């Protein structure tokens, strides 16, 4: 399956999260992985979030 590239892949897109605009960033606005997380050092229940730059947006 080949997905066609569209406007979401535009390398000129900029994020409101400054760290997502840094050269070599693992999670720029064109690559927003979803996952589960919890604050470091806690035993809280896992939460769902998306990585943007060096931040996690809690969903």
Image (cartoon, grey):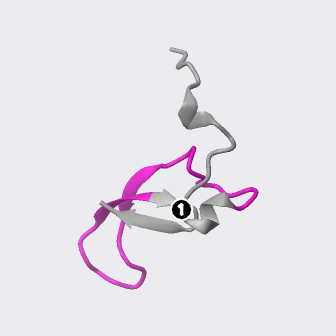
Left or right: 24 in relation to 56: right
Please name the residue shown 26% across and 78% down the image.
Answer: 44
Is residue 35 one of those drawn in magenta?
A: yes
Residue 40 in picture, x, y percent from top left: 42, 80
Residue that appears at 39% across and 54% down: 35
**Location of residue 35 with respect to 38 vertically, above or below:** above
26 horizontally vs 55: left or right: right
Quadrant assignment, res 30: top right
Name the residue at the top extreme. Answer: 1
Q: In this view of the protein, which residue sits in the foreground, 47 or 22?
A: 22
Q: Is residue 33 above or below residue 39?
A: above
Q: Main secondary structure of the magenta part?
A: loop
1 or 41, which is in the foreground? 1
What stretch of residues is rendered in magenta?
Answer: 22-50
Q: Is residue 38 magenta?
A: yes
Looking at the picture, how far across and down is residue 46, in whole percent?
A: 28, 67
Tally of numbered tags: 1
* Residue 49, quarter of the rendered image: bottom left
Spot the residue most to the right: 23
Which residue does the numbered mark 1 point to in the structure image?
16
Q: Residue furthest left?
A: 45
Circle 1 packing at 10 Å, graded few (<14), some (14-19), many (20+), is few
Q: 44 left or right of 7?
A: left
Q: Secondary structure at mark 1?
A: loop
Q: Residue at x 62, y 67 (%)?
A: 19
Classify the position of the C terminus by image quarter: bottom left
Tell which of 16 and 38 is nearer to you.
16
Q: Position of residue 22 (x, y in %)?
A: 71, 62
Residue at image location 35% in from the left, 72% down from the top = 38
């Amino acid at each position: 399956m080949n997905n066609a590239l569209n406007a979401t892949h535009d390398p000129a897109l900029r994020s409101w999260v400054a760290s997502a605009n840094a050269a070599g960033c693992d999670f720029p606005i064109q690559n927003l992985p979803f996952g589960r997380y919890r604050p470091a050092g806690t035993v809280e229940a896992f939460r769902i979030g998306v990585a943007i730059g060096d931040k996690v947006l809690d969903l």
